């Protein structure tokens, strides 16, 4: 059984560009959450998707948006990239209120 | 919102000794407390969790304790091994919430 998968592994963008990150949840999971982890810090919650709707959102600007597909996979989109958006972006999947399992993350570097 | 504080930020122990990491939380409505281990270049891995109706939980060399009155919870690793070296994060989730609120992390180094 594959765990949570994310693509791409690494990404380099320049300021002002847009980026799309992808996540496939663990089998049997229907909920996907996205987190941003800056170097040396704990993950910060961006938003959570359930039944193709954004169920909860953290303190991130509207430049951060997402989508969940009928197969429960999800995308994170970031527009107008800033240098401060450089981080490890983590996807976590879960079922109902159960444990959240994380993928390996996508390392985004903004130059 | 929930605020989680984690101590210490770094911990160095001799192989075979015990390691203890402590976290405090602010929201009395929090009822789920997971611990994650993150190795270099990888995503966080859930290693143990506890819910507010339980005071202690053990899984082999790892144990977690919860004091709801004091709003703190701790991770205990016994008989540490070199492969226990990693960054450990505590987190809390209020009952009316879905997001994990993480502590800042503890870098554990096990000296051989």
Image (tube, rainbow, N blue to C red):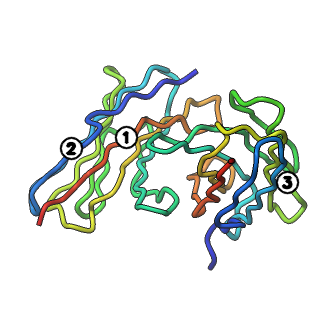
Q: Which is more toward the observer, B34 or B42?
A: B42
Residue plotted at (42% across, 56% down): B38
Q: In this view, does B24 lie above or below B17?
A: above
Residue beneath the point at 70% across and 57% down: A12
Residue A1 as seen in the image, left or right of residue B32: right
Q: How far apart are marks 3 and 2 (CA)?
A: 39 Å
Mark drawn on residue B20: 2
Q: Distance between the residues labelled 3 and 1?
A: 34 Å
Rendering coords of residue A78 (x, y %): 80, 44
Q: Position of residue A94 (x, y in %)?
A: 65, 55
Mark 3 — residue? A68
- Can you tell which quarter of the image residue A40 is in? top left
| Left or right of residue B110: residue A11 | right
Residue drawn at point x = 48 percent, y = 24 percent: B3
Tell me which numbered mark, 1 or 2, is placed earlier along the sequence: 2
Give the residue number, with chain letter if any, for mark 1: B54
Both marks 3 and 1 on one chain = no
Tell me if label 3 and label 1 are in contact, CB under 8 Å.
no
Whether B24 is drawn above or below A85: the answer is above
Q: Quadrant of residue A80?
A: top right
């Amino acid at each position: 059984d594959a765990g949570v998968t994310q693509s791409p592994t690494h990404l380099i963008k320049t300021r002002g560009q847009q980026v799309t990150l992808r996540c496939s949840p663990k089998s049997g999971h229907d909920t996907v959450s996205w987190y941003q982890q800056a170097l040396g810090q704990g993950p910060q919650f961006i938003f959570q998707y359930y039944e193709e709707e954004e169920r909860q959102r953290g303190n991130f600007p509207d430049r951060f948006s997402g989508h969940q597909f009928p197969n429960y996979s999800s995308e994170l989109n970031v527009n107008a990239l800033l240098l401060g958006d450089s981080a490890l972006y983590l996807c976590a999947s879960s079922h109902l209120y159960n444990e959240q399992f994380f993928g390996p993350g996508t390392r985004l570097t903004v130059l | 919102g929930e605020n989680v504080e984690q101590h210490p930020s770094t911990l160095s122990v001799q192989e075979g000794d015990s390691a203890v990491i402590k976290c405090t939380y602010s929201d009395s409505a929090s009822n789920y407390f997971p611990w994650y281990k993150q190795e270099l270049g990888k995503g966080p891995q859930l290693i143990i969790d506890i819910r507010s109706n339980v005071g202690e939980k053990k899984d082999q060399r790892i144990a977690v304790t919860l004091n709801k009155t004091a709003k703190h919870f701790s991770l205990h690793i016994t008989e540490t091994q070199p492969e226990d070296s990693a960054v450990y994060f505590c987190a809390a989730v209020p009952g009316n919430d879905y997001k994990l609120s993480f502590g800042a992390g503890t870098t554990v180094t096990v000296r051989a």
